[in-house]
Amino acid sequence: MAKTSFLILATIFLGVITHSCLSENILYSGETLSPGDFLSYGSYVFIMQEDCNLVLYNVDKPIWATNTGGLSRDCHLSMQSDGNLVVYSRQNKPIWASDTGGENGNYVCVLQKDRNVVIYGTARW
């Protein structure tokens, strides 16, 4: 019984630690934002909207957008392993891309405190 209780508590503890270490402002290679999902930093929110528009807000004021609203429904944003950030339609067709694709590697899309959304990857030189 003591071993079982210890394992349960250890599992819960590790789950809490893992969850608390997840960043709210970073999207890693292979991760996606589904409709309604977002990155946030302070008052800035970078959200994949239901109408397929990817928008950066400062509180409730839009400050940048892909202008893809209405082109489809239920789109998702993907941080690809080649460094390209892409909005895909429900039919999995690209409707917007950052055109930052290159070599395969580990990339991150970061919403920074200065409101810039930046893609970082391995240096090429």
Image (cartoon, rainbow, N blue to C red):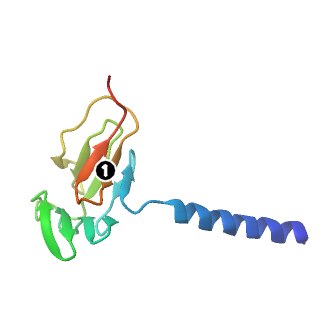
Residue drawn at the location 32% of the way across and 65% of the way down: 41
The x and y percentages for residue 33 are 33, 59
Quadrant housing residue 65: bottom left
Q: Residue at x 29, y 70 (%)?
A: 36
Direction from residue 93 to residue 5 in the image, left or right: right
In which quadrant is the N terminus drawn? bottom right
Q: Secondary structure at mark 1?
A: strand
| Location of residue 54 in the rendering, given as x and y in whole percent from the top left corner | 19, 61
- Can I make out residue 101 in this image? yes
Q: Vertical placement of 67 versus 57: above or below?
A: above
Left or right: residue 39 versus residue 62 is right
Mark 1 surroundings: few (<14), some (14-19) or many (≥20) residues within 10 A: many
Instruction: Residue at 74% x, 65% y: name it.
Output: 10
Among the 4 quarters of the image, the one containing residue 12: bottom right
81 horizontally vs 118: left or right = right
| Residue closest to the eye, 78 or 83 | 83
Question: Quadrant of the image for the C terminus?
Answer: top left
In the rendered image, the residue lying farthest to the bottom is 60
From the viewer's perspective, tell me whether residue 51 is left or right of residue 83: left
Position in image of residue 68 (x %, y %): 11, 59
**What kind of residue is marked 1?**
Ser
Q: Nearer the viewer, residue 117 or 84?
A: 117
Q: Position of residue 104 (x, y in %)?
A: 36, 31
- Does residue 9 lie above or below 30 as drawn? below
User: Which residue is identified by label 1?
Assistant: 78
- Residue occupying the far front of the picture: 114
Q: Is residue 92 visible?
A: no
- Specify the farthest residue to the right: 1
